[in-house]
Image: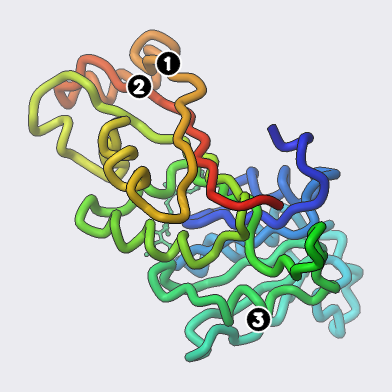
């Protein structure tokens, strides 16, 4: 899926210190990746674990060469309309520390240090072509899901896609199914959230597997809580318009 597109910007909401960020930053087809998380430790740990992405962006005035991640001092810049984010910039990667629900286009646009690309119609593409949502929407409280989708809607270029990995706690005790995070996010809830949005073109489930079968050892803690299965599902949500 990724290789079909040529040069695109990727947003990783609630990124934590995920290795997905580094995978995406190094991907040939990715021009720019932006991760958002509220926890300072996620920023610090990611930078320390991937120093090569930050080497030329760090303040090494103490004489360190930056090869050892523990020596890297990346200075954060405030961004967003209300300076509500701190931006840690590296090589085609930025991590924004702040509350995802405060994300505005200003925070994103100030991230684009490189010249923006123009599409076939000559329009400038400044926002995101891909949202990479793995363990993100499932991490927030169900009451906040509509708000989360609204934030996403303002962040996407026409013709972009949301790659969404969700969990469906399909059977077990009601208590175990309601427990979170991660919260259960069944297919019908994903369709309820996205299909009536005027910016969404299609929602497709590409695959699913039952974690109780695929990873029985990992699943044991859920089983102990009263779940009998838990499906991990991969969706691609296509937005309207063309890139
Ligand atoms: C389960 S982790 C997901 C990490 C990542 N997506 C991955 O695949 O490893 C959830 C993350 O969401 C972050 N988070 C939760 N609510 C947030 C919010 N409102 N704004 C920013 N980050 C938030 C937490 O700090 C945590 O790092």
**Relative to 217, is 42 on the left or the right?**
right
Q: Earlier in the sequence, mark 3 or mark 2?
A: 3
- For the point 66% across and 77% down, which residue is it? 109
> Do the numbered discs 1 and 2 sit on residues whose CB atoms are within 8 Å?
yes
**Residue situated in front as seen by the camera: 240 or 219:** 240
Q: Is residue 183 left or right of residue 13?
A: left
Determine the image quadrant of residue 42.
Answer: bottom right
Near mark 3 (Cα within 10 A), the count class, few <14, some 14-19 or many ≥20, is some
State the image coordinates of residue 26 (x, y, percent, origin top left).
Answer: 81, 47
Q: Nearer the viewer, mark 3 or mark 2?
A: 2
Given the current orientation, which residue lies at the most extreme left position?
174
> In the rendered view, would you say 234 is above or below 196?
above
* First-in-chain label (1 vs 2): 1
Please tell me the numbered disc located at residue 76. Answer: 3
Mark 2 element type = strand
Mark-to-mark CA distance, 1 and 3: 40 Å
Count the numbered circles shown: 3
Question: Could you say whether the residue bearing mark 1 is in a helix, strand or loop?
Answer: strand
* Label drawn at residue 209: 1
Q: Residue furthest bottom?
A: 82
Above or below, 77 against 164 in this view is: below
């Amino acid at each position: 899926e990724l290789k079909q597109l040529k040069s695109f910007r990727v947003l990783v909401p609630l990124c934590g210190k995920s290795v997905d960020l580094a995978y995406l930053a190094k991907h040939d087809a990715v021009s720019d990746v932006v991760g958002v998380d509220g926890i300072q430790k996620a920023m610090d740990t990611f930078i320390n674990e991937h120093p090569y992405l930050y080497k030329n962006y760090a303040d090494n005035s103490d004489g360190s060469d930056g090869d050892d991640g523990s020596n890297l001092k990346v200075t954060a810049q405030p961004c967003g309309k209300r300076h509500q984010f701190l931006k840690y910039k590296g090589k085609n990667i930025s991590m924004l520390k702040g509350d995802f629900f405060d994300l505005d286009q200003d925070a994103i646009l100030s991230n684009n240090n490189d010249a923006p690309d123009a599409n076939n119609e000559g329009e400038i593409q400044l926002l995101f072509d891909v949202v990479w949502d793995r363990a993100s929407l499932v991490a927030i409280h169900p009451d906040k899901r509509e708000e989360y989708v609204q934030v996403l809607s303002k962040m996407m270029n026409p013709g972009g896609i949301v790659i969404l990995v969700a969990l469906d706690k399909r059977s077990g005790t009601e208590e175990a199914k309601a427990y979170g995070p991660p919260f259960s996010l069944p297919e019908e809830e994903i369709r309820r959230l996205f299909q009536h949005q005027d910016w969404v073109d299609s929602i497709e489930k590409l695959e699913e597997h039952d974690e109780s079968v695929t990873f029985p050892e990992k699943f044991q803690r859920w089983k102990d809580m009263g779940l009998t299965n838990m499906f991990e599902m991969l969706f691609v949500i296509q937005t309207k318009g063309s890139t």
